[in-house]
Amino acid sequence: RIERKRRIKELLDYVGLSDRINDKVGRFSKGMRRKLALARAIVHEPEVLFLDEPSSGLDPEAQIMVRDLILQLSEEMGVTIFLNSHDLDEVQRICTKIAILQSGEIKAHDTVKNLRDKMGKPRVEITLSDSKDAKKALNILNSLDFVSVSDCKRDDSRITAVIRDEKSSTILSVLMRNGIVVEEIKRVTKSLEDVYLDIVQKRREQNE
């Protein structure tokens, strides 16, 4: 019994609830209840923990608290965590490996970086100083053999282009030689959401 009390106090300290040990749970915020639920889940020191949408319905501050706690459980206590979530930003921040499921089947399984490398094409985002130059810039980019015409898109003064084996500085030089002032040019990394949508769309097309 003494050991059990010590363990409970230790976990309440760990999740930052030791000062509320005598409070009724009904007075807890949603985030505090979620932290308490995590403490209860690890009271028996499990090696593996399954979490289903742990941040669902929480405000941003509480989401950060729960996310940090999950990372601590993994990194400091060595718990293997299986996280089920539709929040792909959360998955991207927490997980070392991910599996993308569709209709109950695993469609992809790898690290976030490897999935990005496999599914993502090298893209650059170009912001022009004057939106009036956008049409001219788009035509110039489409004339370059290392730019994919089908993946070159314009949105007001911003152009996103898929390039092959070239540095961003090459595009910058070409545009400047043609009198186009570039405010910013940067490489764009696909988000996990983009990767997910690409995989799901590809599978749908294969099944049609």
Image (cartoon, rainbow, N blue to C red):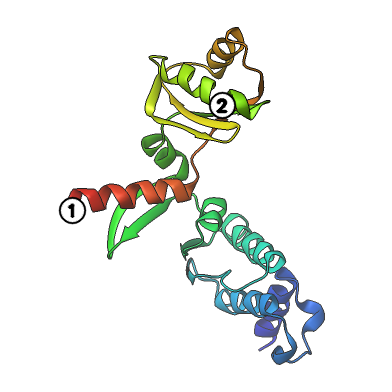
Q: Which residue is drawn at 29% across and 57% down?
A: 106
Label annotation for residue 82: none
Quarter placement of the N terminus? bottom right
- Please provide percent x and percent y for residue 104: 28, 65
Question: Which residue is situated farthest in the right direction here?
Answer: 19
The picture places residue 59, in percent across and down from the top left corner, at: 67, 69
The foreground one among 159 and 134 is 134
Q: Which residue lies furthest to the top in this view?
A: 177
Which mark lies nearer to you, 1 or 2? 2
Tell me the kind of residue under disc 2: Ala
Q: How crowded is mark 2: few (under 14 residues within 10 Å), some or many (20 or more)?
A: many
Determine the secondary structure under disc 2. helix
Residue position marked by numbered label 2 in the rendering:
134
Q: 10 Å neighbourhood of mark 1: few (<14), some, or many (≥20)?
A: few
Quick check: 93 above or below 48?
Answer: above
The circle on residue 207 is 1
Q: Is mark 1 on a helix, strand or loop?
A: helix
Q: Is 124 on the left or on the right of 127, as rendered?
A: left
Q: Which amino acid does label 1 sit on?
A: Asn
**Which tag, 1 or 2, sits closer to the chain's start?**
2
Q: With 92 as the anchor, is 18 left or right in this view?
A: right
**Snapshot quadrant of residue 185:** top right
73 sits to left or right of 122: right
Name the spot of residue 178 as percent of width and height, x first: 57, 10
Q: How many labels does the image show?
A: 2
